[in-house]
Image (cartoon, rainbow, N blue to C red):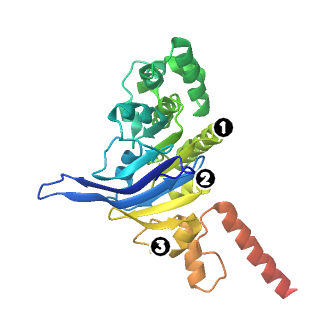
Amino acid sequence: MPDTESILRLNDVYHTYSYGTPWAKAALDGVSFQLRPEETVIVTGSNGSGKSTLLQHMNGLLKPERGQIYFKGQDIWQDKKNIRQVRFQIGIAFQFPEYQLFHKTVAEDIAFGPKNMGLTASQINERTEEALFFVGLEQKIKDYSPQRLSTGEKRRVSLAGIIAMQPKILLLDEPTVGLDPQGGQLIMERMRAYQQARGIALVIVTHDLENVGAVTDRVIMMKEGKIHREGQLSKILAGAPDDELPKPVITQLFQELSARGVPVNRGTMLVNEAAAQILDLYNKRKEKRA
């Protein structure tokens, strides 16, 4: 029976690409996963580990060969007629979503989802303006062609199109890929602000732990279609070998310091955490000299 505390639950899910052929490949191998309301979860791992496949099962873009997926306690595949409504409530933004902008204006692109939901013109306009606000774009941009925008602006317009449907869960597949550090940080700040304002759950597939690490409640590391490690990010970073997880530069530095006998936290990844530890070490050394 599905539990009532999770907004989304995957129960022993399997998926194989090219099933029944000589080149069949298991993408998900008995994955079980629970997402709580308002929780932020990062899904990471090497290429081909099953991250994006897992994300596409969460909102019903892919159907599992075996296993169940529950949203608000209901099996999303129990009645195929309901799957469209599930996708409205579990929004997904793919890697390089700006390539999916195809309307003449920004407003038309953002309105695409709400129109398919059957909303009125006034409701669509209200949601479009609200979505632009949440992604940090000016209202005048509504009348622009998407082709006039920068890569970062296009990324935010694509996210606005998902936000305009007001999903209960937001799934992001590599949201910062291809952006400079400032652009990646801005995207995550806006998504975090939206999450806090609307009380939604957030799942982020990424390799970019430096930009998203500060917002996460839990990390899941995928390997060969299974959940290989799960827990707090600092503990995952401290315990995972370098060949399993691309570690932030600060983490690499602090693990090297630890290996040389300096008493620091091997899982450190944020600048403020690193600065606090260095300052503490400096003060202790100063006290000893006094």
Q: Secondary structure at mark 3?
A: loop
Q: Amino acid at mark 2?
A: Val
Above or below residue 22? Residue 4 is: above
Q: Can you tell which quarter of the image residue 62 is in?
A: top left
146 relative to 28 in the view: left or right: right
Q: Amino acid at mark 1?
A: Ala
Q: Which mark is residue 211?
A: none
* Foreground pick, 106 / 215: 215
Q: From the viewer's perspective, is the residue at label 1 or at label 2 nearer?
A: 1
Q: Are marks 3 and 1 in contact (CB under 8 Å)?
A: no
- The crowding category of the residue bearing disc 2, from other C-alpha atoms within 10 Å (few below 14, some 14 to 19, many at least 20), is some
Mark 2 to mark 3 CA distance (whole Å):
20 Å
Horizontal and vertical percent position of residue 28: 32, 58
Q: Can you tell which quarter of the image residue 108 is in?
A: top left
Please give the name of the residue rendered at 67% of the width and 82% of the height, measured from the top-left corner.
263
Q: From the viewer's perspective, is the residue at label 3 or at label 1 nearer?
A: 1
Tag 2 residue? 215
Horizontal and vertical percent position of residue 72: 51, 43
Please give the name of the residue rendered at 49% of the width and 37% of the height, measured from the top-left corner.
152
Please give the name of the residue rendered at 49% of the width and 55% of the height, measured from the top-left corner.
34
Tag 3 residue? 240
67 relative to 153 in the view: left or right: left
Quick one: label 2 or label 3, which is nearer the N terminus? 2
Horizontal and vertical percent position of residue 227: 41, 64
Counting the numbered discs, the total is 3
Mark 3 to mark 1 CA distance (whole Å):
34 Å
In the picture as drawn, the residue positioned furthest to the front comes out as: 1
Tag 1 residue? 197
Q: Are marks 1 and 2 in contact (CB under 8 Å)?
A: no
Residue 56 seen anywhere in this rendered image of the structure: yes
